[in-house]
Amino acid sequence: MAKKIEILSLSKSLNGKMVLDNVDLSIDDGETFSIIGQSGVGKSVLIKHIIGLIIPDRGKIYVDGERIDYGNSTEADKIRRKFGMLFQGGALFDSLSVGDNILFALDHLRSELPESRKQEMMLGALELVELPGIENLMISSLSGGMMKRVALARAIVAEPSIILFDEPTTGLDPITTANINELIIHLKQKLKTTFVIVTHDINSARFYSDRIGMIYGGKIIFTGTPDELVRTENPYVRQFIEGKYEGPITDDYNAALEGILHTNIKFKKRGAAYGKG
Amino acid sequence: MMETLKDFFQDLARFTIFSYQALRLIPKSLLKPVEIFRNISQIGVESVPIVAITGLFLGLILGLQLSGAMEAVIAGTAQYISGALSVALVKEIGPVFTSLIVVSRICSSVTAQLGTMKVTEQIDALKTLAVNPMEYLVTPRVIAGIFALPVLGFISIMASMIGSWLMMILFHDISTAAFIDVAQTPLQLKYVIESFTKMMFIGGTLLLVSTFCGFETKNGAAGVGEATIRSVVISSFLVILLDYILGAVFLLFPGGEM
C-alpha cells in the first residue's frame, strides 16, 4: 500500500526535555492510525510535526512522497491543504458563528469556489457531523460535544486527504464519547481518507483503528493492529492497556521522581551547611 | 541577574523578529482593507467617546488651575495661559495622554484576545487553514494603530482645548476671540507635525507590543492574565520613553528647538 505519511528519525526537545527521540513511523494511504500513550508523552507534539505546526530539531517528514519544507511558507501551506485537523479543545473562532467558522476554512483553503458552492459544502459538512441547521448559532452557545463536531466539520469541509484528530474524545462524557467514536467510523466509511488519531482512550482506539502505535519515553515502542495490541507481551504496553498502577511505567516514574527528590535534598543539605558556617 | 538579562535580550530579539515580520506584511495587508477597517473601528472609532471625555476633563482642570495661577501671578493675564496650553497639549500632553488611554483600553484587550486564541490553539488552527496569523491578526492591528492614534490624539487635544476655553470664559471672563488668538500665536506647524509623527510611531509600537505579548502567551488562563499585565506595563513605559526619545530626535531637526 502507498505510504501517505513517512516520518524518519524525528527528534524534538521542548524546554530541555527530549519529547521525541528518533521516531520512525509510516502511515498508509486510507488507514486509520491511532497514536496512544500517557498524557504529556508527546503524542500531540508528533501530530503537530506532521502538519508543520512544530519544526523538528532533526529528522524528515514526507507527505505523499513530498518532504515538508518548513522554511518555505508557500510550500508548507501547499502541503497543509492536504490536511484537516481537529484540535483538542476544538479551536473554533469564538468571534464567528458556526457557519462562518466552516466557511472561513473554505474561504482560505478553497478560495476558487463560488460562494453558493461554499454554502452548500458548509451545510453538507454540518449534515455529515449530524448537526444540521445550527449554522447561525454562536460558538459560545454550544456544548463540549457539539463543539468537537463543529470543529470536525471545519476539519473535513475542504475535503482534505488526511485528517488529524488530537484527542477527539478527551473531556467528554461516556455517551458523547461513544457518539463521537461512531461518528469517526461513519465519516471513515463516507470519506475514505487517511485518519491519524491521537488519544489515550484505549477502548476508543481499538474501536476505530486499523493500526495502533504507542509512544513511551519519546519512542514508538509498539505498532500493530488492535488484535496485536491486545495480545502483545510488551510489559509497558500491557500496563497501559490494562490501566494498572503497578508495572514498568510506574517504576520508571518513581525512579525519576526519586532522582528529582534526591537532587533537591542534596541542595537543601548544602544550603543548611552554608547556613551553619 | 544574568538570567534576567539573558531573558530580556532573548525577548527583545524575538520582538525584533516579530516586528520585522509584521511590518514586512504591511503592503500585502493594505490590499485587504476590510480587516484594517474592522480594526480601525475597534481600536479607533470605539475609543472616541473615552478619549473625548477624558480629554475634555483634562482641559477643564488644566484651564481652571492654570488660568487661576496665571491670574494670581499677574492679575488680568489669564488668557495668556491658552497659548501655553495649546503648545503643551499639542506637543506632549495630548500624545502621551491619548496613548495611555489607548494602552488601557486597547493593549489590554488585544493581548487578552490574542493570548486566549494562543492558549486555545486558535492561532495553530489558523495555520492549518493556510492562513498566516501575522498577516491576519497582527499587521492589520498595527496599521490600525498607526492611523487611529493621531486621529484620537487630535480629538483629545481639541476636547482639552474646549475644556480649558470653557473654564476661562466662565471664570475669567475672557472672550473666545482672545482665547483662540493667544492659543494660535506660539503654535507652529512643525509642532503639529512632530505631534502626529510621534503618535503614529507610538500607535504602531503599542499594537506591536500588545500583539507580541498575546502571541507569546503560555500556560492557560493564568498565562493570559500575566501576558496582559506584561503588555500594559511595557506599553505604558514605552509611551513615556518613546515620547522622550522622539521629542529629543525632533530637537535635532533645524528649527526643532522651542
Image: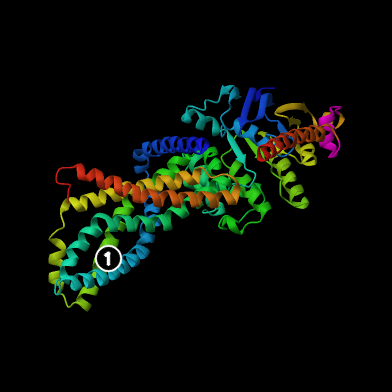
Which residue ends up furthest to the front in the rendered image?
Answer: A277
A87 sits left or right of B60 in the view: right
Front-lying residue, A184 or B173: B173
User: Magenta includes A204?
Assistant: no
Q: Is residue A121 visible?
A: no
A233 in magenta: yes
At label 1, the amino acid type is Ser
**Label 1 neighbourhood size at 10 Å, few (<14), some (14-19), many (20+)?**
many
Image point 87% across, 29% down: which residue?
Answer: A231
Instruction: Tell me how many marks there are.
Output: 1
Q: Residue B78's image quarter? A: bottom left
Q: Quadrant of residue A181?
A: top right
Q: Secondary structure at mark 1?
A: helix
Would you name the residue on which mark 1 appears?
Answer: B160
**Residue A199: horizontal and vertical position, in percent?**
72, 39
- What color scheme is it? rainbow
Q: Is residue B38 above or below residue A213?
A: below
* B169 sits to left or right of B2: left
Residue stretch rendered in magenta on the structure:
A232-246
In x, y percent, where is residue A93? 54, 50
Residue B150 in picture, x, y percent from top left: 29, 53
Residue at position x 50%, y 37% from top? B7
Residue B254 visible from this viewpoint: yes
User: Which one is in front, A159 or B226?
Assistant: B226
Q: Residue at x 26, y 61 (%)?
A: B157
Q: Nearer the viewer, residue B124 or A32?
A: B124
Estimate the x, y position of residue B102 in percent, counting from the top left: 38, 56
Q: From the viewer's perspective, is residue A102 above or below residue A163?
A: below
- Give the vertical position of A84 relative to B104 (above or below): above
Q: What residue is at 71 percent from the left and 49 percent from the top?
A: A171
